[in-house]
Image: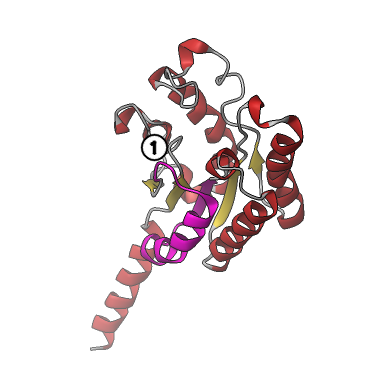
Amino acid sequence: MFLRLCGLFCAVLFSVSVRAETVLVLGDSISAAYGIEVEQGWVQVLAAKLREAGSKAQVRNESISGETSAGGLARIDHILNAQKPAVMIIELGANDGLRGLSPAELKHNLAEMIRHSQAHGAKVLLLSMTIPPNYGKRYIDMIYNVYHELSREMAVPAIPFILDDIALVKELMQPDGLHPNAKAQPLIADKIWRHLLPLLTPSSKKRD
């Protein structure tokens, strides 16, 4: 009986040690591969890059087109309990801006999502978002500054606008001028890749 219990204990320890980390993406249409095949989206491209690099990390996508920061906050606890991610990538806020919502509310919602994620043991990677120039410089700056403020105040990494150098290139955007096309997705994945790798544990960066 003692040997059987020891064997069971060792098996449990082994299963925990080799369990792959989960990288979870919580975003809107930019992360939900709007207008293109899901397999072409940057989330799947990032997952493929991790596999090709020999990483054991698994990427899960909980993004919904049209999602706002309030919607993300309403869903996050259920997602965290179900997925138990090691890293949470949050890509939300553009729809808040497009709807003219309060930057203060955006900051509150994102801050709560960061707190909830950290309370579940997840590291957070924040993707900074912005909105088209016709919304006026003052409002645009208020929205974009939210990400810098949260990065500084909560000590989480924030990637600069992921469509920078993409949004104004016609060949990389869909006809609506808001969503990147399939050609742009590897460029987005590359930007996130560089910031994601330091957040993964050494054991998840490479397969045994």
* Residue 177 counted in the magenta span: no
Rendering colour mode: secondary structure
Image quadrant containing the N terminus: bottom left
Q: Which residue is situated farthest in the top direction here?
A: 171
* Residue 77 counted in the magenta span: yes
Q: Position of residue 120 (x, y in %)?
A: 51, 67
Q: Which residue is situated farthest in the bottom direction here?
A: 1
Secondary structure, mark 1, is helix
Q: Position of residue 38 (x, y in %)?
A: 31, 33
Residue for point 66% across, 25% down: 133
Whether residue 192 is visible: yes
Q: Is residue 196 above or below residue 37?
A: below
Residue for point 60% across, 55% down: 110
- Region rendered in magenta: 64-91
Residue for point 37% across, 57% down: 18
Q: Position of residue 146 (x, y in %)?
A: 70, 46
Circle 1 crowding by C-alpha within 10 Å: few under 14, some 14–19, many from 20: some
Pick the residue in front: 163 or 96: 96
Count of numbered circles on the image: 1
Q: Position of residue 63 (x, y in %)?
A: 41, 46
Left or right, 46 with respect to 73, comes to left
The type of residue carrying mark 1 is Ala
Whether residue 201 is visible: no
Q: Is residue 71 above or below residue 120?
A: above
Pick the residue in front: 50 or 99: 99
Residue for point 39% across, 37% down: 47
Q: Which residue is mark 1?
A: 47
